[in-house]
Image (cartoon, grey):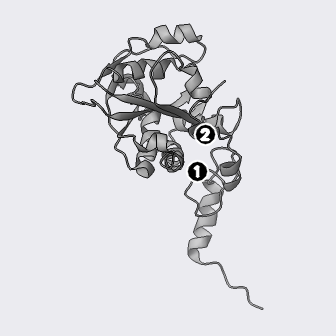
């Protein structure tokens, strides 16, 4: 019996996969040939979802109690050290993988648009990077998460904030140190007017909430603005 050779296209895919493997950004395992999503099916179901959007009071809203007037707040995942979410965020922030933010934004946007508290959102505002840091990284990771949310929620991304102070990294700072670090780092964009709008402020990770608080306080300077927040993950 004669064995027919594989089609040239399949042979080329196998060859490319040998030298340029298509790996899941969450676990590092090979993805099926032709899969464009950056996460494998197993990780898709095993990523630690919080279900914050289903509860008016949750770990995210509690973190900002008494600090800002919020309509709603929700993080997609629970951040676990050395876990799948940390690996995804590493690829998004430090490995040039913008598609991770876009993918997660589209997934979470599909969930948020079915929740009444988020259906009245008028615009999505990403937490900005300082221009110097954005130039070094090449993009703003929160912007790509916002773009994904925008695609499925069908709401525009509006750049209503700018970061005017190049602050130190906050990875090892306490909550009080983070608040001081970012307290004067943001300003409103002069060309954007949002009076009476419901704005969804988004970032990649919530830790103490200091950055979101500083940005939210600026946005609330618009008369009658309603503020909600969303993030890819929340850390303990």
Spatial CA distance of label 1 from label 2 is 9 Å
Outermost residue on the bottom side: it is 1
* Residue behind mark 1: 38
Residue 209, how many percent across, how many down? 53, 20
Left or right: 67 in relation to 60: left
> Residue 49's x, y, as percent?
65, 41
- Furthest residue toward right: 1
Q: Considering only vertical position in the picture, is 44 above or below 77?
A: below
As drawn, the label of residue 88 is 2
Q: Are marks 1 and 2 in contact (CB under 8 Å)?
A: yes
Q: What element does badge 2 sit on?
A: helix
Residue at image point 40% right, 42% down: 120
Q: Quadrant of residue 128?
A: top left
Which quadrant is home to the C terminus? top right
Secondary structure at badge 1 equals loop
Residue 135 vertical placement versus 15 (above, below)? above
Query: Of residues 66 and 201, which is closer to you in this image?
Result: 66
Q: How many marks do you count on the picture?
A: 2
């Amino acid at each position: 019996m004669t064995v027919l050779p594989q089609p040239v296209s399949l042979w080329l895919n196998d060859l490319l996969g040998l030298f340029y493997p298509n790996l899941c950004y969450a676990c590092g395992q090979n993805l099926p040939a032709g899969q464009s999503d950056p996460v494998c099916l197993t990780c898709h179901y095993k990523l630690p979802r919080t279900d914050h959007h289903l509860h008016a009071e949750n770990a995210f809203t509690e973190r900002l109690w008494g600090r800002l007037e919020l309509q709603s707040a929700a993080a997609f995942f629970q951040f676990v050290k050395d876990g799948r979410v940390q690996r995804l965020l590493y690829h998004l922030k430090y490995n040039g993988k913008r598609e991770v933010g876009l993918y997660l934004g589209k997934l979470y946007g599909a969930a948020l648009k079915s929740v009444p508290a988020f259906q009245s959102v008028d615009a999505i505002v990403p937490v900005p990077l300082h221009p110097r840091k954005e130039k070094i990284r090449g993009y703003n990771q929160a912007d790509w998460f916002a773009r994904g949310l925008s695609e499925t929620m069908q709401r525009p991304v509006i750049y209503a904030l700018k970061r005017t102070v190049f602050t130190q990294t906050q990875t090892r700072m306490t909550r009080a140190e983070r608040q001081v670090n970012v307290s004067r780092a943001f300003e409103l964009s002069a060309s954007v007017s949002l009076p009476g709008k419901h704005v969804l402020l988004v970032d990649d990770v919530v830790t103490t909430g200091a950055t979101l608080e500083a940005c939210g306080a600026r946005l609330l300077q618009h008369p009658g603005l309603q503020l909600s927040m969303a993030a890819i993950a929340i850390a303990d």
